Amino acid sequence: MIDLKTSLKLLSVDNIKMHESFQATRLEITMSAISNEKILINPIVTTRINEHDYMIIDGVHRFLSLKELGFRTVACQIVEEDDVELTMWSHLVKAGAWLKDFTDKNVIRTKKELGNQRYAFKITDSKQEVFYFYLIDDQKLMSFVEAMHSIIAKYSSKYFVRVSELSKSEIIGDDVLVEFYNISMKEINNIVSRKDQLPTGVTHFSVNNRLLNLKIPLEYMEPAASGRNWLDFIMHIQQKLRYYPESVYICE
């Protein structure tokens, strides 16, 4: 059984770092829900990046909502890097065939995969034609980050869906699938240390031993709350935890 005393903590907002940006509309909805319900249903999931700081791997909008509401400490689940699997979301862009003609002075567009280089992203259309986009200078990590921001900015205001697995036959009509080359956790840590961020909706973290549905009252994160009250709350929910080893589906 997971020990909540070590894995669930109140962390200062000053020691929590973001590796990706956020969506303004989603932030507004999340902040409204937290403010009205007076609870944080799921803690922010973080992993330690140095002696003092933690990086959010899930819960950017919850974190920013609490910060905007004036909280200086927030409830976080701290997970070990070994318990995290990092992959990349792909984006199914509706009526996005025009993206195949994307041009940028720092990007090379080709229909052939270059085996000795990693692409910044690739685009597949409904005819299974694939377009690869490589960087002219592929040795700089921030060049990959800038390329991601650049392509996503082209369609972020339009309708697109994040997908982890998709059969190419599901790309229809003028839709296209945008896929990004995998970024490592070490590279993400480097991005955070530079105080830069990836675009929202590209990293996909799978977390073992995830804590869900804790329904943490906001009062425990207020300045007047005592450490004893927080400890009592942890002891209370520790008795109610249920571990499910099999895959589950949660309707959000």
Image (cartoon, rainbow, N blue to C red):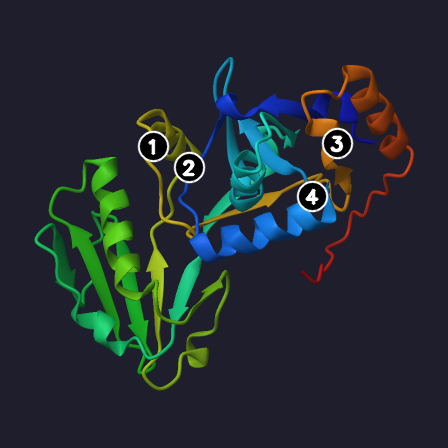
Mark linked to residue 19: 2
Sequence-wise, the earlier of marks 1 and 3 is 1
Q: Is residue 219 left or right of residue 19?
A: right
How far apart, in angstroms, are the residues tagged by discs 1 and 3? 34 Å
Q: Amino acid at mark 1?
A: Ile
Q: What is the three-letter code of the residue carrying label 3?
A: Glu
Q: Look at the numbered discs 1 and 3 and tell me whether their residues touch, using CB distance below 8 Å.
A: no
Above-or-below relation of 8 to 64: above
Disc 2, disc 1: CB below 8 Å?
A: yes
Q: Which residue is mark 1?
A: 191
Q: CA distance from mark 3 to mark 4?
A: 15 Å
Q: Classify mark 3: residues with Cα within 10 Å, few (<14), some (14-19) or many (20+).
A: few
* Viewport quadrant of the N terminus: top right
Between 15 and 182, the residue placed more toward the observer is 15
Which of labels 1 and 3 is toward the front?
A: 3
User: Quadrant of the rendered structure where residue 153 is?
Assistant: bottom left
The residue singled out by tag 3 in the image is: 219
Q: Mark 4 to mark 2: distance in Å?
A: 19 Å
For image coordinates 78% across by 47% down, the residue present is: 245
Mark closer to the chain start, 4 or 2: 2
Name the residue that disc number 4 marks: 42
Please provide percent x and percent y for residue 130. 26, 70
For residue 91, side relative to residue 16 (left or right): left
Using the rendered image of the protein, determine whether residue 26 is visible from the camera's viewpoint: yes
Amino acid carrying mark 4 in the image: Asn
